[in-house]
Amino acid sequence: MNKSTLEKQIIETWFINHRTNLMLIGELTQEALDYTTSKRGGGTIGHQLAHIYNMRFLKLEKYDKKLISDLTTITAEDKKTIPMLKDCHTLSAKRVAEVLEDGLKKDATIKGFTRGVVPLLGYFISHEAHHRGNILLTLKTCGFKITDKLKYGIWEWNKI
């Protein structure tokens, strides 16, 4: 396997993860964004999806503030909507890909993440998969009809 093939796989892996998030968001209703298993009312699905974006924002900010100059974090008070979350995730996914691509050009080093490109990719995917699992559990607990697309489709990485 040559270097360019491996680099392409790294970027494609990131975008498969992103498309998995979009698949999840696309199956939600606006009402489902307010579902939570918290007795205090925190940790809604909308909040968790905003948190994923906010974590991307923070990592982008550490890498290069120019990458977030036209972005802002999503606050707890902000109304979360499906279109807004899709837009935030899509824009930030492209910016994260830029960071990964840039890091690959620089011998796999990443400013603000000393372990490098592949560990950063692993960090993002692990973090986001954790929240996807939490969101699916919340949906089930709250009686949301989980489609086969969500049950099985998120694991079909050769098709996503």
Image (tube, rainbow, N blue to C red):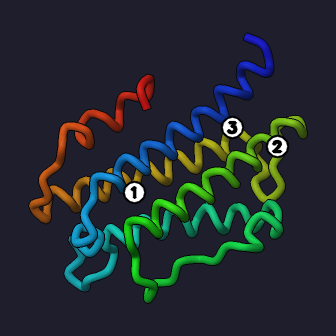
Q: Residue at x 72, y 62 (%)?
A: 60
Looking at the image, residue 71 sits to the left or right of residue 160; the answer is: right
Q: What's the CA distance linking mark 3 and mark 2?
A: 10 Å
Residue of label 3: 118
Amino acid tagged 1: His
Residue of label 2: 103
Amino acid tagged 2: Gly
Labelled pair 2, 1 in contact (Cβ < 8 Å)? no
Q: Earlier in the sequence, mark 2 or mark 1?
A: 2
Residue of label 1: 131
**Residue toward you, 157 or 41:** 157
Tally the numbered discs.
3
Q: Earlier in the sequence, mark 3 or mark 2?
A: 2
Decide: few, some or many residues near mark 2? Use Cα within 10 Å; few <14, some 14-19, many ≥20. some
Q: Position of residue 29 (x, y in %)?
A: 25, 64
Q: Is residue 69 above or below residue 28?
A: below
Q: Residue at x 22, y 62 (%)?
A: 138
Where's the C terminus, which quadrant? top left
User: Quarter-wise, where is residue 140 in the image?
Assistant: bottom left
**Residue toward you, 81 or 54:** 81
Residue 132: in sight, yes or no? yes
